[in-house]
Image (cartoon, rainbow, N blue to C red):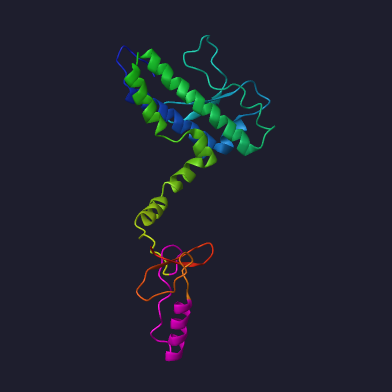
Amino acid sequence: MDGGGTPRTPEDVFRDFRARRAGMIKALTTDVEKFYQQCDPEKENLCLYGLPNETWEVNLPAEEVPPELPEPALGINFARDGMDEKDWLSLVAVHSDAWLLAVAFYFGARFGFDKESRKRLFVMINNLPTIYEVVTGTAKKQTKEKTPKSSSKSNKSGTKPPRQPEPNSRGSKMPPPKDEDDSGGEEDEEEEDHENTLCGSCGDNYGQDEFWICCDACETWFHGK
């Protein structure tokens, strides 16, 4: 990418970033066997380059000093046989992400991007998964986590009707009502039980149509007053 005297925009730099990123992802996924073979540990320091035409190449670093563009990580081939293949690919992916950011903001500085232009460039870049996330499968996991399942759960909890108090919940309550379906003998027994109930405070008997309260701790009945 060359300035060529023409003002460059964050969108121009982002297109370059996206093309180089696509080439490097291809090297670490669909072309991984070819990439693996080219990273021969017997060779000198090798680098993985992403090119603006969405291709990739493994090559020696630039000889000119300082280089025209920031250089990717050197010697990725030396660690190939000393690591598990997945771990090695993940390591290359991390360095590739760092290199892409360095190249993008190198262009941003070269083209004189101001604060807002740099921010716009970063937002566009940040909306894409990193190469590391693509290679390790983290990007797919994040996409699954964004399914509406979690929101549906929150909606259910939000519309859940308030819990109704249980009829025998502790607190302010009346003495147990008489069961109309019971036989006459049982009704008489219950009436006798109620009449024998004494207020724990004043000692008076239970009277019909009076409001009573039961203590949760000692299960003693008291007049509501």
Q: Position of residue 32 (x, y in %)?
A: 56, 37
Residue drawn at 47 percent across, 41 percent down = 139
Camera-side residue of 76 and 58? 76
Residue drawn at 51 percent across, 25 percent down = 98
Image quarter of residue 223: bottom left
Residue drawn at 48 percent across, 80 percent down = 193
Q: Position of residue 50 (x, y in %)?
A: 48, 27
Q: Is residue 193 within the magenta segment?
A: yes
**Quadrant showing the N terminus:** top left
Q: Position of residue 126 (x, y in %)?
A: 41, 31
**Residue span colored magenta:** 168-196
Camera-side residue of 164 and 140? 164
Q: Position of residue 56 (x, y in %)?
A: 49, 29
Q: Is residue 85 within the magenta segment?
A: no
Residue drawn at 53 percent across, 22 percent down = 72
Residue 57 visible (yes or no): no
**Quadrant showing the C terminus:** bottom left
Residue farthest along the top direction in this orientation: 65
176, above or below 12, in the image: below
Camera-side residue of 94 and 225? 225
Residue farthest along the left direction in this orientation: 6
Residue 182 visible (yes or no): yes
Residue farthest along the bottom direction in this orientation: 184
7, above or below 14, in the image: above
110, above or below 165, in the image: above
